[in-house]
Image (cartoon, grey):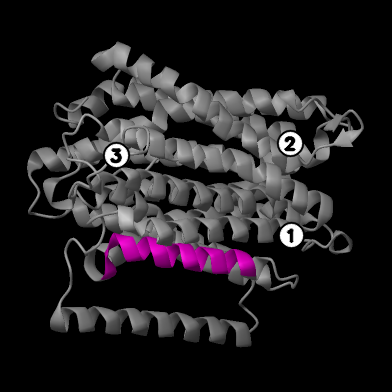
Amino acid sequence: MSQEMPAAGPVATGRGFFGHPRALATLFLTEMWERFSFYGMRAILVLYLTASVADNGQGIGDSGANALYGTYNAMVYLMALPGGWVADRLIGARRSVLWGGVVIAAGHYVMAVPTDWSVYAGMALIVLGTGLLKPNISSMVGDLYDRDSPRRDAGFSIFYMGINLGGFLAPLITGFLGEKINWHLGFAAAAIGMTFGVIQYVVGQRNLGEAGRRPTDPLLGADRRRALTRIGLVALALVVIAAILALAGLFTVNAVVNLLTAVTLLVTIGYFARILVDHEISDTERSRMKAYVWLFVFAAAFWLIYDQAGSVLNTFAEKNTDRDVGGFTFPASWLQSVNPILIIIAAPLFAVLWLRVGHRISTPVKFSVGLVLNGLSFVLMAAAARAAVGGGSISPLWLVAVYAIQVAGELSLSPVGLSVTTKLAPVKYASQMMGLWFLATAVGDAIGGQVARLAASWSEPTYFLTFGLASVVLGLAAVMFARHIRAMMAGIH
């Protein structure tokens, strides 16, 4: 589960939340409930899509469900780019978070409606709402502190715990309701969670001071009207295109998934090209961006495997694990709570580790460690899948071990990637670089959704072993090129 980085801003006064501004409690709880709704729905999404119509599911095959899941995750992170722009130029972070939360809740309520179309309309709303909320709530946390405040990092550590607390609790509740009673009841629980988040955010706004109240770089007058007109025209064009495709019989799940995958890749390529050809950045900054391209590729490859926890590994848990405890078969989605609780436990340990090793291990090497560990988790999954060949049920501890390895990989790559993104950013693009980091997850999830289609046609041991070894090889290659990449980073460790 990814961390977010702040933007600088005015300081909110007052204490009252573990020695931090009271406003941190408001943002902590908002993020916790938003992540509750996000990970709660995500934990049962693929299981609902692949469940038979007789079991009140969609009856979609594993291939289509995995691709749809990957594309949904990709869109969530891709929309962080326009979401940040809306806050910076139009309405400010505070209102962006509020309206984002309202739209997310609406999306989950739509998914709670027991009809075939509700899941797709609901996901579209959640994507739009998360794009508004996710990048901007993090910037508001940053607004609570001076940039050089010694409490700043501690404040973000507390905030980050909210992410994982929500991620831990959500599958336990939505998974039980969705798998044991009714899928749409699970989606409704996610909706209620986000509603709690919105209510406490509104009540707690009085504690926020000036944090996120105004756009940081507002569009005014004619520029604002021109921007709103363009947004309206783009929205209208998308509606017209969707209508034409629907009338032509081309508006299918697979068509939309493939189109959005292509959009994600094109946006990423265009973003990098724009920065690299910009004559206003220095040669040193351009060299650092070339190094960042490699780190971006490594990160995308990492998320390609890592985020299959909610799709391929989730369906494996449902079909191939022995989840009977004392006569009670616990929901497969409960295993989605393993990742966040392990992060809560391990994150402080890795923070101490990286502090002690200092610059003796470079950023590219840390990325390579993440890739190798991620790959080894899939190699272990290949062994688990082989043990389940023939329809046998294996211990869920196999998956717990897989998630433990993946968490070690995440903590080797994700926090380091957040840090190096801010360090390698050209001055001109400093405020946009975190959006580029989110794009790495979007690209990984988009391609990962397409790759996960193969899990339905390949044998499971072959699938896991192939991509596990590919990640290990890429990680080892990263070690070999680490010195060259570090040279391009021009003094950045």
Q: Specify which label sits upstream in the sequence, 2 or 3.
A: 3
Mark 3: which secondary structure? loop
Q: Residues within 10 Å of mark 2 (few under 14, many from 20)?
A: many
Left or right relative to 250: residue 231: left
**Which SS class for mark 2?**
helix
The reply to whether the magenta stretch includes residue 104 is: yes
**Label 3, on which residue?**
15
Q: Can residue 269 be seen in this snapshot?
A: no
Q: Is residue 184 left or right of residue 107?
A: right
Q: CA distance from mark 2 to mark 3?
A: 53 Å
Judge from the rendering whether residue 403 lies leftward or rightward of residue 459; answer left or right: left
Residue 185, numbered circle:
1
Q: Amino acid at mark 3?
A: Arg
**Which label sits on residue 337?**
none
Q: Hey, which quadrant is residue 290 in on the image?
A: top left
Of label 1 and label 3, which has the lower sequence position? 3
Instruction: Say if 324 sits above or below 68 in the image.
Output: above
Compared with 32, 48 (above or below) is: below
Residue sitting at 34 percent across and 66 percent down? 95
Question: Could you tell me which quadrant the C terminus lies in?
Answer: top left
- What residue span does the magenta drawing correspond to? 91-109
Q: Find disc 2 in the rendering and name its residue.
A: 460
Can residue 140 be spotted in the picture?
yes
